[in-house]
Image (tube, helix red, strand yellow):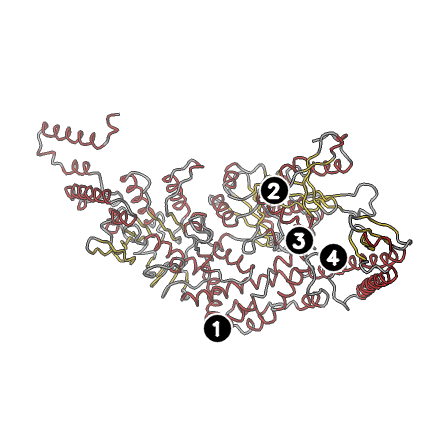
Amino acid sequence: MNDAGDLTPLMRQYREIKRAYSEAILFFRVGDFYEMFFEDALEASRLLAIALTSRDKARGEPIPLCGVPYHAATGYIAKLLKAGRTVALCEQVEDPKVAKGLVRREVVRLYTPGTLVDSELLLPSEANFLAAVASDPAATTLGLAALDLSTGEFWAMELHGARAQPDLYDELSRLEPRELLYPTGLPLEVQRLVGRLKDTRQCPREPAFFDLPRGDVGLRARLEQLLADCDPRDLTLGSRAACAILGYLQETQPTAPLDHLKTLKLRSPEHHMQLDPATIRNLELLKPLVDDRRGPTLLSVLDRTVTAMGSRLLRQWLVRPLVQAAPIQDRLEAVSELVQNVQARAGIRAALRGIQDLARLGTRASLGVATPKELLALKDSVAVLPAIRTFVQDMHAGRLRELGASWDDLTDLYQAVETAILPDAPVSTRDGGLIKDGYHPQVDELRKTCREGKEWIVQLETRERERTGIDSLKIRFNQVFGYYIEVTRPNLPKVPGHYLRKQTLVNAERFTTEELRELEARVTGADLKLTSLEQEVFGQIRAQVGREIGRLQHMASLIAVLDVTTALAETAAVNRYVRPHVDEGGTIRIVEGRHPVVERLDLPYGFISNDTLLDLEANRLLIMTGPNMAGKSTYLRQVALIVLMAQLGSFVPAREAHIGLVDRIFTRVGASDNLAGGQSTFMVEMTETAQILASATVRSLILLDEIGRGTSTYDGLSIAWAVAEYIQDRRQLGARTLFATHYHEMTQLADLRDGIRNYSVSVKERSGEVLFLRKIVEGGADRSYGIHVARLAGLPAPVLNRAQEVLGQLEGSAAQHSALSTCSLDPSLPPPHPIIEEVRQMDLFSMTPLEALNRLAALQKRLDELDPRADQ
């Protein structure tokens, strides 16, 4: 960067401002452009694919320069944010016409991923959270706060005990914050935990940043106002995290009033099911397992919402199902009434389609940045509220009655915009044309003067044509030269002497006259005054709407709930779902259950429904056996999704469903590795299994698919056997579990332990071919049909034939040791090694010492042959 002595005053001003925002790309307002200089210009020109030029070439080393038009800046800012950069917006904060010397400039906003309120930069169906974490020194109590600045949703919570850290990670994974604040002194184990978050900008700050500010009276008052309804003793670390968020807003949005932050809500982890990232991923709640945005998910099946607010709320309900029967029943009762009342459901949905994003529109009005088009969109959204109220007020379900009782038509806000703003008002306020005739007397008077002035210009043009005899004479206007008389070059001899030359062109000359100057002064002055006054009046109307942000947020919340409820009812009606019975008992009984996502696919033979019975007594652990591709994994996920749907308040795909509440759902399915983190497939499998065993309770629902497949057969079988016993044992866990496995030996557990039942996927063999019936039946499978699956996959015939030969030899060898299947097993152990069993059955008292020695030598030789490591 050039020495300060070599720089112009403008560049020195730029350097001073840039010094305070060294990590951001500085958009420096110069006239109608935001310009970038030095290293910012080099980087921005590359990221934005715009031309790189330079300035001040005569003052030594040229300064790199690039720029974008100020009216198109949002699109360029979006590209920089997507590239992982932040943008500091530096505006001219005084009128250049009245400024003495250099125009004063200040950064009025710092664009960061977690503080966006611009509709062009946000996804309508997803929240945009800024989060903060605080911790005690031992990391046994953690505070978490989160704010969606675009809607004003602001909440905090605290997590305690041994589960605090994993619960924090689970909560952050569900939250998917765009930015995360944390103190630099955060315990290392928590820092490593939050560092695992993907697509989250990490923002470490000094510990003092998390303390209630003593010197900042305004920020302190705002935090105390937000915490007015909270007991500080219940939210010590949570309030510190919230304090950090407010401080960050003050740092990044110095001119924003933030009046739309009305309250800080307390969130309790006990009120919602704490789903971990593996379960959300494995059940494909929000995203498909394969990297295909168009792939089906539970969200895509259920999301028939018609408003952005409803779509965002449904995502929250999906990853935070309820765990208490009463609020679940309230939701189900509302959905049930809307399923039955087709006319009301259709009417509500038709009206809801007319509502745009009321939550974010209200925020932009409160912040003073809403455009005329956005105020008109808000007005049109409010216009349909009375029609929706007529449907809601006649409902009987308690939840719907509550909506009707607190309904607000917002009629005054509708009238404020309707009577003032022109229906075809432009996107921007800079060109005027905003206010209706008859609304403001001074606007009407100035508008009349402008119209008359332009008529006078037209009349002057006609008179000058007649006076000079120049038929092509024209009076025109542009921003640089104002009004002028244009005469083509062939007609220049006819130009009167009192015409004053203004500009010379290749084919014409431009002139002015004293009369034109007087008219221009009157018309231009009126135009400028009119534009300025319309902007002022519009600002007043926007502020009037913004002051009612609390009412707008309230109605946005009600509309979101109503939208989700009617969407769930519509989905239930279209997909033939039934209302589940949900209670505090331990029984999960599903009759003819279906997978809500898979059944929507175009399956050649349709979807085969299946029954399920899980309880806390005789059916605690169901061992599922059967071949690959037969549908075991689909069945496991199906049961979990039906339970989850019931507890979020949805009808379910079944003929009948009785759901005994579960506190958490855990899944360990599929094979994946974490090579970047140094973890093999088996290590990932064992880590996830360990987390399940450490976190589950007797009220949990556990899905385990192919535990132990990542290691040797005996190791894998032993681990799977021990895990099943641990889960089954009520003294250790006793949770309801579906356990799919290829280890057929595990079916013996049903005879050795109570609470375990065997189920399998039925298969039909016909003429050497295998037909997967996808029906779950009681009893274990005795074959895996792996070679048949390999044939379906297209393996070459010689490979398949040889595999069949090897299988026959192995099965024949196994038959020689059939005693293994009938031996007396210790219930806590898997089937023993054949040689161990042979030693156990030896009659030592009938053998001579030499015979015993020879027998021992033979066994030792066999062991050496089985274990090649013995020679090492």
Task: State the residue lying farthest toward the top.
Answer: 872
Q: Which residue is mark 1?
A: 341
Q: Which residue is mark 3?
A: 225
Q: Nearer the viewer, mark 2 or mark 4?
A: 2
Residue 158 rendering spot, x and y as whole percentages: 54, 48
Relative to 44, 534 lies left or right: right
Whichever of labels 4 and 1 marks the residue nearer the N terminus, that label is: 1
Mark 1: give few (<14), some (14-19) or many (20+) Cα within 10 Å: few
Q: Nearer the viewer, mark 3 or mark 1?
A: 1
Callout 3 touching callout 4 (CB < 8 Å): no
Q: Nearer the viewer, residue 637 or 584?
A: 637
Q: CA distance from mark 2 to mark 4?
A: 30 Å
Whichever of labels 2 and 4 marks the residue nearer the N terminus, that label is: 2
Q: CA distance from mark 4 to mark 1?
A: 49 Å
Question: Element under label 3?
Answer: helix
Question: Element under label 4?
Answer: loop
Q: CA distance from mark 3 to mark 2?
A: 46 Å
Q: Nearer the viewer, residue 128 or 511?
A: 511
Q: Which residue is mark 2?
A: 49
Callout 4 touching callout 1 (CB < 8 Å): no
Q: Nearer the viewer, residue 441 or 721?
A: 441
Residue 236 rendering spot, x and y as whole percentages: 59, 46
Relative to 578, 62 lies left or right: right
Mark 3: give few (<14), some (14-19) or many (20+) Cα within 10 Å: some
- Amino acid type of disc 2? Ala
Residue 267 rendering spot, x and y as whole percentages: 54, 53
Q: Which mark is residue 431?
A: 4
Mark 2: give few (<14), some (14-19) or many (20+) Cα within 10 Å: few
The residue lying at 72 percent from left, 44 percent from top is: 29
- Amino acid type of disc 3? Gln
